[in-house]
Amino acid sequence: GAGVSQSPSNKVTEKGKDVELRCDPISGHTALYWYRQRLGQGLEFLIYFQGNSAPDKSGLPSDRFSAERTGESVSTLTIQRTQQEDSAVYLCASSSEPGQGSGELFFGEGSRLTVL
Amino acid sequence: GQNIDQPTEMTATEGAIVQINCTYQTSGFNGLFWYQQHAGEAPTFLSYNVLDGLEEKGRFSSFLSRSKGYSYLLLKELQMKDSASYLCAVRRYSSASKIIFGSGTRLSIRP
């Protein structure tokens, strides 16, 4: 597709279960970001992938969170042993390389995670 | 690290003008973005400033002063559909040029 695609759009899980969220960026975009947005809050940076460089994981809140990206394509965000505080919308965004225009972010529609 | 501050909420009247301010502190500044986010939707790109000055795009303008660590988004001829959150975001120039967002300003437009 032409835009950033995320799945699932909605996920309800029980506390303690693992979840995997998927992001398919715009073709050709070298940069990929994951953000978390709690209800009524701003975007909290989680992790950033740029090409083949080591990812910037400085925003991951705990070792229960991890993310992978295959080359310059699909990324998965995994949350292990989910807690109720993990309930949020997880937004993925991709951009072309900085220097190629503004390098603005294009966002997916997000994955809404509810942990019961 | 980075610190990005913007007002939490603002209210304005339909047809009027509103200015949303954003101040930031960061090393290696490499651009500032404004995004609009309607409730329940993904953010959409509004503007980008990397040099000092004013960028105008229709009813929206964005200003940047790098020496002051300051930007504003100016919305003219406000419409009810402009009710949304406005997010200021800063990119750092480094080996990993990540983009960090402020907490956003929730703008309400009244008739």
Image: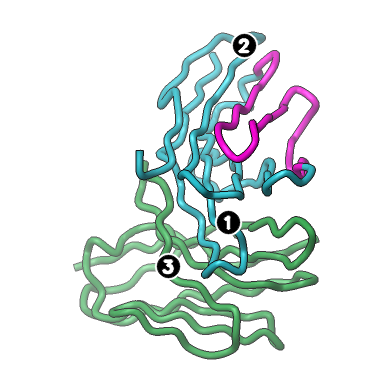
Chain colours: A cyan, B green
Residue at mark 1 to residue at mark 3: CA–CA distance: 13 Å
The type of residue carrying mark 2 is Lys
Mark 1–mark 3 CB contact (< 8 Å): no
* B14 up-or-down from A82: above or below: below
**Mark 2 = which residue?**
A15
Q: Position of residue A8 (x, y in %)?
A: 44, 23
Q: Which residue is mark 3?
A: B10
**Quarter of the figure that contains the C terminus of chain A:** top right
Q: Which mark is residue B103?
A: 1
Label 2 neighbour load within 10 Å: few <14, some 14-19, many 20+: some
SS for tag 3?
strand
Q: Position of residue B97 (x, y in %)?
A: 71, 59
- Image point 60% across, 85% down: which residue? B51
* Type of the residue with mark 1: Ser
Q: Give the mark toward the camera: 2 or 3.
A: 2
Q: Position of residue B83 (x, y in %)?
A: 31, 60
Q: Chain of mark 3?
A: B
Tag 2, which chain? Answer: A
Between the residue at mark 2 and the residue at mark 1, the CA separation in whole angstroms equals: 27 Å
Going by the numbered disc 3, the residue's amino acid type is Met
Q: Which residues are magenta?
A: A55-82
Mark 2 and mark 3: Cα distance apart in space: 37 Å
